Image: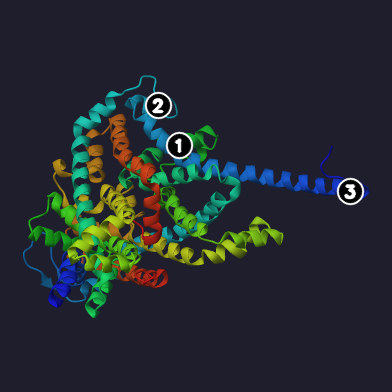
Amino acid sequence: MTLLNTKEDVLKSSPVARYQKIRSKIDLRSKISKNIFLLGLLFFAFIVLYPLYWMFISSFKSYDEIYNNVWSLPSVWHFENYITAWSQGISSYFFNSLFVTILTILLVVLIGSMAAYSLSRYKTKWINVALIFIIGGLMMNPQVALIPLFEILTWMNLINTHWALILTYVAYRLPLSIILIRAFFLSIPKELEESAIIDGCSEFGIYYRIYLPLSIPILITTVVLTAYFAWNEFLFSTVFIDSSALKTIPSGLMGFRDALRTDWGVLLAGMVIASIPMIILLILLQKYLVRGLSEGSVKG
Amino acid sequence: MLKRIKLVPMLFLLPTLLFLGVFVYIPIVQNFFNSFFDFSVFSQTKEFIGFRYFKELFEDKILMTSFANNIKYAVISVIFQVFFALILATILEDKLFRRIAPTLRVIYFIPVMISISVIALLFSFIYNPQMGLLNSFLELIGLESLAKPWLGNATTAIYAVIAMSQWQSVGFITMLFIVAIQKIPKDLYEAADIDGAGRIRMFFNITVPQVKETMFVNVLITVTGSMLVFNEPYILTNGGPGISSMTLSVHMYQLGFIKDNMGYASAVATLIFVVTAIFALIQIKVSGTGKDE
């Protein structure tokens, strides 16, 4: 049966048959377009995944194989690339990143939630000024502050220490984190704190016993966003840290490349190790990350 | 009692104000003043030279190339990230793909999560003239005439850098659009469906007007990001070959930390600040950040 009946055919048939014919025509059309779109989506997924797949597979290859057999699977799986990468520097970058990231997270969550608490609970002229000051911080970007920060950190004797990174990361993450946490704090019903005050709870107690426990979801969002930023930050870690022993993963990888020259398999293994924590974080906590990104609408 | 209540909010705000003051606001102001001085990292003194560096900005060939590259970056990123991402998000959110969409969303988002230095090193393999994936692929499909040293060629370098950025960031903007589309009331689409509207009409008459605000914010995020771009060109090409893939931030970095001309670098930074602050102000205004809701 052909799809395109002649006009007479259609007119001769019963209304039900006519309806079914039109229906099946529409179904077929939408099926074809569905498949075209599906192919497009899968093709794009392939473009995203293939380079990452290539990075993973090639990290098990020798230099000769990466160079000569670009597309093939490794003939011999060089698992030792990972051991070499780890022992030749990645482990130290990894733990430096871990240290810097964890301290940044702790400070951002603690200081940020305290500020958000003040901003959401009190309404005075000065609180408004502080709020504008903090929102204004969103407009400032690290590039513009780079040279003065270098001077200030030199003056503080912090160049070439992890604190140069931690303190600046905290400062640049606070505005967005505070705005997110404050919005959440504002939604906490006032009755809760009123009854707490009647029960004799102190100001600090309300913050610590009521606001913080109720806000776990937004605090997780803040943790994920801060982790994402601190783990991947490149400019400050390149400029403020000189010593290879103190470098974090993003800047460390650059030195790694220069030191290795042709040991591409080892470099690729290092790149894979550097990416794994964030991919795990994404898969475990994607809903928190997405909420933070969309509510903050600020590029990391 | 009264005193204690007033003290607590200020105490709670104090660390934040200190952090922002010392590491965000003072540097921005100091940068502005620095651009009137001539100094180097090693010199103890700064020599006042007035507006000389601001005048030099207008005659700086590297700066002009950089600025043009930033603009190229912005235009391509807006087309690709904002428009392509909106279409991608619309298709993903269509009920036809309800089952596969969550998996695809995560896949598209993976590059966003990976450190830019890993991405840039990966792309230096992809663009490698001898063994790179891109040239090998062109050879595979019989287009080896198109193969070139993508990063070593002055005309293609900046586009190769921009292409990598799109590959990494499109998932990010797509995710913002998905969140916006999910907030659109479902009955709008149902009503349109009953009226017999096709998907394309629904896209233009419902989706686009409903996500207009998100779209505008995404344009601003993308443009601001393009004006600041540093990591991608710095790692992939270091602004080269020659000055063909320079951006404002790379220029500033090289002036300050390679050529040790801190004063002039500060003038470039001031220019970056002015350009981005305008976009940031509009963004804060539009997105209503800090509004009580």
Q: Answer with the quarter of the image where residue A133 lies.
A: bottom left
Q: Answer with the quarter of the image where residue B272 lies.
A: bottom left
In this figure, which residue is indicated by the disc labeled 3?
Answer: A10
Q: Position of residue B103 (x, y in %)?
A: 48, 42
Is residue B249 visible in the rendered image? The answer is: yes
Contact, CB < 8 Å: mark 1 with mark 2?
A: no
Mark 2 vs mark 3, CA separation in Å: 62 Å
- Mark 2: give few (<14), some (14-19) or many (20+) Cα within 10 Å: few
In this figure, which residue is indicated by the disc labeled 1?
Answer: A50
**Quadrant, the C terminus of chain A:** bottom left
Say which chain tag 1 marks.
Answer: A
Q: Residue at x 85, y 48 (%)?
A: A16
**Quadrant, the N terminus of chain A:** top right
Give the label, 2 or 3, closer to the camera: 3
Give above or below for B206 relative to B233. Answer: below
- Mark 3: give few (<14), some (14-19) or many (20+) Cα within 10 Å: some
Say which chain tag 2 marks.
Answer: A
Mark toward the start of the polypeptide (2 vs 3): 3
Mark toward the start of the polypeptide (1 vs 2): 1
Q: At label 1, which amino acid type do we have?
A: Tyr
Residue B186 vs residue B260, the one in the foreground:
B186
Secondary structure under the numbered disc 3 in the rendered image: helix
Q: Position of residue A168 (x, y in %)?
A: 19, 58
Give above or below for A226 relative to B107. Answer: below
What label does residue A68 carry, if any? 2
Q: At label 2, which amino acid type do we have?
A: Asn
Residue A288 vs residue B212, the one in the foreground:
A288
Most distant residue in the left direction: B44
Give the label, 1 or 2, closer to the camera: 1
